[in-house]
Image (tube, rainbow, N blue to C red):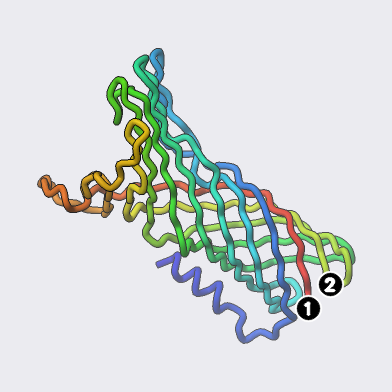
């Protein structure tokens, strides 16, 4: 309830206040995984260790429309595209072969925010708390193995690709930054933006299955090709190979700290 109330407040607060004028801005940035979770495990002949990180590292592009309701207070709606870095999520090396899995994500996000700012003659600074709303959220999993016994036996090679879709989620963001006026209407800005976002898996579909160099996805059974996730599943085992596998939802962490740089134009 709090998440939705905050979202409504971002969209509705200050509508009765006189507007000081609109601005548009665009930026590009890069995000670093933080705070980290355990993404998977790495098994080696002599030790086993956790793999830490998030799926939130990567490139970030955003276009914003801002309406200043007062000289120091405004509302902003951002249209964001996130292109995630390919991240190691599992590795097994046991003397017979090696298994590895990598995952990355692409997301289109809406980012409504409040804007609190102070502008000097040439320099300014601002703080922007807000929400992160993934509208389109797909992650891509790549698995490869040469005979370690995880998915391929000795002498076999297997590689597969899968796409995972997610339930709707609400995340939070907070940005702090500074601006430098280049002209009366054009400014350069840089910011640090922290995002806290975790999403629950909805479904996973295998899109490629290459066995010993031959694509074999058309011969894979439905139960091995499609997985559907939920918070509750039946305890009995469904032996029908022509229906999807059922599993409990997994929570994937997309939290990150971004360093962004961009331009702002005031009308």
Quadrant for the N terminus, please.
bottom left
Residue at 80% x, 60% y: name it.
Answer: 188
Please report whichever mark, 1 or 2, sits nearer to the chain's N-terminal start.
2
Q: Position of residue 94 (x, y in %)?
A: 36, 17
Please indicate whether residue 69 sits to the left or right of residue 254 in the image.
right
Quadrant for the C terminus, please.
bottom right
Residue at 37% x, 35% y: name it.
Answer: 159
Kindly tell me whether residue 38 is visible in this rendering: no
Place residue 61 in its image quadrant. Answer: bottom right
Residue marked by disc 2: 185
Kindly tell me whether residue 99 is visible in this rendering: yes
Residue marked by disc 1: 267
Please indicate whether residue 99 sits to the left or right of residue 113 in the image.
left
Q: Find the distance from the CA under tag 1 to the CA under tag 2.
A: 7 Å
Q: Position of residue 110 (x, y in %)?
A: 54, 66
Place residue 177 in its image quadrant. Answer: bottom right
Residue at 61% x, 57% y: name it.
Answer: 174
Q: Are marks 1 and 2 in contact (CB under 8 Å)?
A: yes
Q: Look at the numbered disc 2 and give the secondary structure of its residue.
A: loop
Residue at 74% x, 59% y: name it.
Answer: 262
Number of numbered discs visible in the structure rendering: 2
Specify few, some or many for label 2: CA neighbours under 10 Å numbering under 14, 14-19, or 20 or more: few
User: Camera-side residue: 118 or 233?
Assistant: 233
């Amino acid at each position: 309830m709090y998440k939705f109330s905050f979202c409504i407040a971002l969209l509705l607060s200050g509508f009765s206040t006189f507007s000081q004028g609109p601005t548009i801005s665009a930026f590009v940035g890069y995000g670093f995984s933080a705070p980290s979770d355990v993404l998977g495990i790495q098994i080696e002949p002599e030790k086993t260790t956790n793999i830490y990180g998030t799926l939130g590292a990567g490139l970030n592009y955003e276009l914003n429309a801002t309406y200043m309701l007062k000289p120091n207070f405004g509302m902003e709606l951002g249209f964001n595209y996130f292109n995630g870095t390919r991240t190691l999520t599992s590795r097994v090396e046991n003397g017979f072969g090696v298994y590895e899995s990598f995952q990355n994500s692409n997301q289109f996000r809406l980012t409504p925010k409040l804007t609190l700012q102070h502008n000097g003659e040439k320099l300014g600074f601002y703080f922007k708390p807000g929400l992160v709303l993934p509208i389109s959220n797909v992650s891509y999993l790549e698995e490869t193995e040469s005979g370690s016994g995880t998915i391929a036996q000795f002498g076999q090679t297997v590689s597969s690709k899968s796409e995972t879709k997610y339930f709707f989620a609400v995340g939070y963001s907070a940005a702090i930054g500074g601006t430098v006026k280049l002209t009366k209407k054009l400014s350069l800005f840089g910011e640090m933006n922290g995002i806290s976002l975790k999403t629950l898996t909805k479904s996973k579909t295998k899109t490629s299955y290459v066995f010993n160099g031959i694509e074999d996805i058309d011969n894979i059974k439905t139960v091995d090709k499609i997985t559907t996730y939920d918070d509750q599943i039946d305890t009995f085992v469904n032996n029908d190979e022509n229906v999807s596998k059922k599993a409990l939802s997994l929570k994937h962490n997309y939290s990150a700290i971004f360093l962004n740089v961009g331009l702002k134009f005031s009308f």
